[in-house]
Amino acid sequence: MEAMPIQTESFKLGFIGPGKLAESIARGVVQSGFLPPQRISTAIHSNPNRGIAFQSLGITVHTNNNDVVDASDVIIFSVKPQVVKNVVLQLRPLLSKKKLLVSIAAGVKLKDLEEWAGHGRFIRVMPNTPSAVGMAASVMSLGGSATEQDGELVGKLFGSVGKIWKADEKMFDAVTGLSGSGPAYIYLAIEALADGGVAAGLPRELALGLASQTVLGAASMAVQSGKHPGQLKDDVTSPGGTTIAGIHELEKNGFRGTLMNAVVAAAKRSQELSKT
């Protein structure tokens, strides 16, 4: 059966795998107004708490994945990378070319997804959890039979929960290491900054609020100012001042190198997952 255009105004979205990232995307899509919850569904097999999370958004929760596929025009595979093959193969008889398939499983290549599904109307996306608050950083790559119109629809879908870029799939391991895993690095940094504030004498609540807002403000400056991060850093750093003293400590302890190593390590793990 030949691929048919998906109607942006009326398409239904299904999630195969009700994990935290799927919930973040669903929550962001609903809260942005891009899709009403009545046009979104997922299935719960074991953990009832996951069902409660989706039902609280008004999303339909089925008891099996077949019902999700039957009800959906666009299907997002959001299961763990280690099980995505079995899940796609189990659903293959239902995955006609009428349905646009999307994978957000880290490390799982398009050529494998297309082989398991039996066709190439697949788009691979690497989002991240800030999609829940409309601030995702996502990257997508189109499969062999996915049309430009399919790409535009997925771009609008993930664009409703943040920003999305298109890139060659060979970059996806690096994308996973940077933006896919990156929020966790930043949460760790926020926690550490807040701990530093407490150590310097601030109440915990004030320290955490200041740390979180400082990271948010600095990121906004980096996005909106058009300046290189190094220039923004220099703008805050006066000779012999407090900021350069703090930066000196960070540099002595390999701050930049540690962050770089974290991205490379996560990218390497993504490569490993793609080979299992």
Image: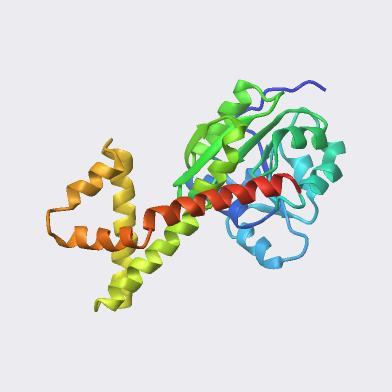
For the residue pair 24 and 42, the one nearer the viewer reads as 24
Where is 26 relative to 47, above or below? Answer: above
Q: Please, which colouring scheme is shown?
A: rainbow
Q: Is residue 231 rendered to the left or right of residue 5?
A: left
Q: Is residue 7 rendered to the left or right of residue 225?
A: right
Could you tell me residue 109's position as x and y percent? 70, 38
Q: Residue at x 12, y 59 (%)?
A: 240
Q: Residue at x 27, y 44 (%)?
A: 230
Q: Does residue 9 appear in this view?
A: no
Q: Is residue 259 rendered to the left or right of residue 1?
A: left
Q: Does residue 167 appear in this view?
A: yes
The N terminus lies in quadrant: top right
Q: Residue at x 17, y 62 (%)?
A: 242
Could you tell me residue 210's position as x and y percent? 28, 65
Q: Is residue 59 rendered to the left or right of residue 235?
A: right
Image-quadrant location for residue 209: bottom left
For the residue pair 109 and 5, the one nearer the viewer reads as 109
Residue lying furthest front in this view? 252
Where is 193 relative to 235, above or below? Answer: below
For the residue pair 150 and 231, the one nearer the viewer reads as 231
Where is 227 relative to 136, above or below? Answer: above
For the residue pair 91 and 243, the one nearer the viewer reads as 243
Q: Residue at x 26, y 58 (%)?
A: 247
Could you tell me residue 67's position as x and y percent? 79, 47
Number of numbered discs present?
Answer: 0
Could you tell me residue 101's position as x and y percent? 71, 35
